[in-house]
Amino acid sequence: MAQGVVPHKGTSSWSWGHTTCPQVFLTGRRLLFACSHTVRSMNVSASLDDASLTLVPGGEADLPVRVVNSGSTVEECRFEVVGPCAEWTTAEPESLSLYPGSSGDAVLKLRPPRSPEIEPGRMPLGLRVVPTSDPGGVVIPESSVTVLPFTEVTADLVPRTSSGSWRGRHKVAVDSLGNIPTTVQLVAQAASERVRLEFVDPETVVAPGEAKFVPLRVRSTQRIWRGVPATHPFQVTVTPAVPEDGAPHQPVLLDGSYEQTPVLPAWLPRALFAAVLVAALLTGLWFTVLRPGVESAAREAVTPEAIREAVNDTVKPTDGGASGGPSGATGTEETQGSGGTNAGESDKPEPGEPGGPAASKSARVKVEDSVGGGATKVTALEVPPNSTFALTDIVVQNPQGDAGSLVVTSEGGELLNLSMENFRASDYHFVTPIQVTGNDAVTVVVECRKVGRPVGRSTPGKCAESVFLGGTMKAAAEE
């Protein structure tokens, strides 16, 4: 109920100030007054133009006001707009000064904003005319204003561009700026047949002042497995439904695009090439650094004692007397001496003795030499007189990685000549043994040019090489 409206008990009329309205119409939440347009007080009367006003939000209209001073003194009247139209209605001028018996005109400027908050329909308009000399003699002429409905729609595509290997996702944001619910239709059209566009809800209703987001799905009809991405443009049309007044609205056009990317990313070949390169580097590291170190450690574990034990296990003395099996047992009584052993076995020489079989023989020597100090010569093995040494194995070790020369010699000549920088550990086996005669010796000569550095250790002061000799020693029979 508007301010200043007081119902009279027992009657069907309403009183607003000093004005009586015999009929009141109730529409929605608004009161429409059917009153006389001319309202009088003791000294002042005012009237509004009885023409019915129809306004479109965003427009403007004028409503004339006539004020008459019927008193005997000069009167100043102030104007105050009341009712639901007061927020967007002003009086020009805001007051009038009238001489006794004169009249004056003012204008009410009605400017309803183009906003969803302005509801359509008929609404009352009242004007308070307040005499300054008699504030109690207020008069309130009244009228009504009809606000028309309007439709206004804006839309936006979010995002404008999408990307993906299989599909793209967009949303169409539809905003209703009108003052009535609006039905909109959405249509999407692609520039080619390589994509399909589909709205989840192609027709939707948007309330005044609200926004709705309608999902749009973009699907490619053909896959791009590798290569350059493809761009597919498309257009979305947002069309408001025809309003009640029959005036069509221009559709809203939105441009978008979908970038179809390859299924296999561009970085995949580079990643595969990098993986192959890393594998090659690891393989090279194994063969150049790790594997030689492992082989060197394994060869260092092969000591002369281990080789000697292996040779002793494989080389057995030849039994020239008794034979195994039942026949040997039968002849035991005939050849057995008083000592309980065979006569042939007691006369058989031991391995290495004159006339006996060859015995295994090995030697190991470590040679150290300083840089620039000349070659160092060390005797590795001496052959006794009347004996022959059959050399079958030579194992040389360079654990520090020294540089220089290593020569194995005997009086018969040079047996082996090596450059130390070419090996860490190396072994040589001869099918035909090298014969070293009696009173001869096998010597090792080392000349150091550069001292190596073992892995994880400090650099030593000298070159250090190890040489292992293996073979059999046989003594000549005594005459």
Image: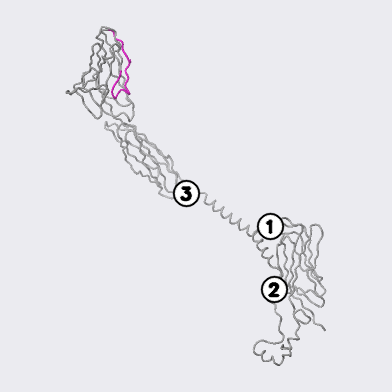
> What element does badge 3 sit on?
loop
Q: Mark 1 sits on what residue?
A: 455
Q: 10 Å neighbourhood of mark 2: few (<14), some, or many (≥20)?
A: few
Q: In this view, does 316 lie above or below 285?
A: below
Which residue is identified by label 3? 262
- Quadrant of the snapshot with the N terminus: top left
| Circle 2/circle 1 CB separation < 8 Å | no
Q: Distance between the residues labelled 2 and 3?
A: 69 Å
x%, y% of residue 131?
Answer: 28, 13
Which image quarter: residue 63?
top left
Taking the view exactly as shown, the residue that stands out farthest to the left is 10
x 30%, y 26%: residue: 56
Question: Secondary structure beneath disc 1?
Answer: loop
Q: Which residue is drawn at 81% across and 65% down?
A: 377
Which numbered disc, 2 or 1, marks the residue that appears first in the sequence?
2
Q: In 3D space, how far apart are the residues under numbered discs 1 and 3 (Cα atoms)?
A: 50 Å
Say which amino acid is labelled 2. Answer: Glu
- The answer to whether residue 133 is above or below residue 348 is above
Q: Earlier in the sequence, mark 1 or mark 3?
A: 3
Direction from residue 415 to residue 29 in the image, left or right? left
Q: Give the range drawn in magenta.
A: 80-99
338 on left or right of 53: right
Q: Is residue 175 covered in magenta?
A: no
| Closer to the eye: label 1 or 3 | 1
Specify the amino acid type for callout 3.
Answer: Pro
Q: Which amino acid does label 1 sit on?
A: Val
SS of the residue under disc 2? helix
Question: In the image, 266: left or right of 331?
Answer: left
Residue at the far bottom in the pictured view: 334
| Residue in the foreground of this view, choosing between 385 and 213 | 385
